[in-house]
Amino acid sequence: MSFLCDLPWIHLSVMPHGVTSICCEANHKNNKSHAVDQHNNLVPIHNNSVEDVVNSESYKQIREAMLAGRVPEACKGCHKIEKAGGVSKRLKDSSWKFDWKSRTAPDGSITPDIRALEIRLGNLCNLKCRSCNAESSSSWIPEYYKFKDQIPLASGYEWIKKKPEFTHAWTEDPDFYEKILNASPNLENIYISGGEPFLVPKHFDFIKRLRDSGNTDLHISYHTNLNYDIEKLRPHLDVLRDFRSVKLNLSIDDVGERNSYIRNPSNWDLTIKNLDYFHKQTDLEIEICQTVNVYNFMYIEELYKLIKDIPIYYNHVHAPAYQSAFVLDLDKRKQKLSEVKNIIPENLYNGLMQYNEIPSDPETVSLFTRYTKMLDQSRKENFEQIFPKTASSLGVANV
């Protein structure tokens, strides 16, 4: 039993289109981590019970493999990280305080007891970030159809729309929240993102029911974009304050017009205003999530220098590859890393060291150039004017 993980027994992860996964970081290829039946048909949450999902054929096989001491195919990513000496999600999220074998039937089935819930509340979003896609942002949909045949986008939105198993409408279905309440009497952690979760009011009814039922000894974590009317949010924030702990992960990728370009059409003044509100007028824990990408890498220290009194952590774009900082010239990346070494905290710097190797690929640079030019024309923006350091680091004269 050398590779046990708590998540297959206690965790439910729901993606924006209603498909569930054993874990958000598991291998989703060929449905390895998704809930599927014996015929490899998806078992989405919107038209199945929680028990149907957690006792789907794929979930049972994952539990059986772990109890037998094997590494499931869906979990090879964590295994790879651990073999390299890293700390995987399995290690971070497991306490191993339960005897999972005694709680598991011979066929791998269990009694549902969701303790960790991760819900991505559909794709309703008021932003269309450069590294996002139509599956996760409704604002991306018009440009998805405009460009899908011209460049490989990070989305299979059209394919999803054709499949009856997929829907983004589950977020408005009261039956979904009822299912979760009934299957999670010992709920401990909730992670909520979107889309933009604060634009989905129905889920607040679920949060309020948890509060009113006395189930407040839990941690709730949100991922949010800061671009909304805070006054409309205040009543819901009052409810959140009744829980043991609430954390807001606030998405900001750069400073001023560069942030507005990357996270179009975000308003920088509104972003800072709402950041200031959460920081100074609430007792909620906040942290800034900065997504490192090809656009902001050459300016990576400037957000930290502007907002030193709020913790920052890095998320990294890996797909599509033409949005990754690996698109930049390797020597330019190394030079930038040298510049920021004594400016940003050590933990942030260490997270950037992955960019200290692997040369840029000419074909990927070409894709980035085409993609950026198309979006600039569509959005009436100018990459070279807003990101001159990045443009020169690509060796780009005119994008």
Image (spheres, rainbow, N blue to C red):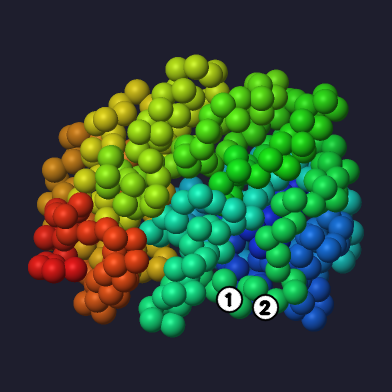
**In the picture, residue 390 is in which quadrant?**
bottom left
Disc 1 target residue: 158
Relative depth, front residue between 217 and 106: 217
Q: Is residue 38 above or below residue 209?
A: below
- Residue flagged by tag 1: what amino acid is it? Glu
Q: Element at badge 2? A: helix
Question: Image check: 361 left or right of 62?
Answer: left
Q: Is residue 303 above or below residue 103?
A: above
Q: Position of residue 159 (x, y in %)?
A: 61, 78
Total labels: the figure holds 2
Q: Element at badge 1? A: helix
Circles 1, 2 touching at the beta carbon (< 8 Å): yes
Disc 2 target residue: 162
* Residue drawn 68% across the image and 37% down it: 189
Q: Position of residue 252 (x, y in %)?
A: 39, 41
Question: Image check: 354 left or right of 136?
Answer: left
Question: Image check: 200 left or right of 229?
Answer: right
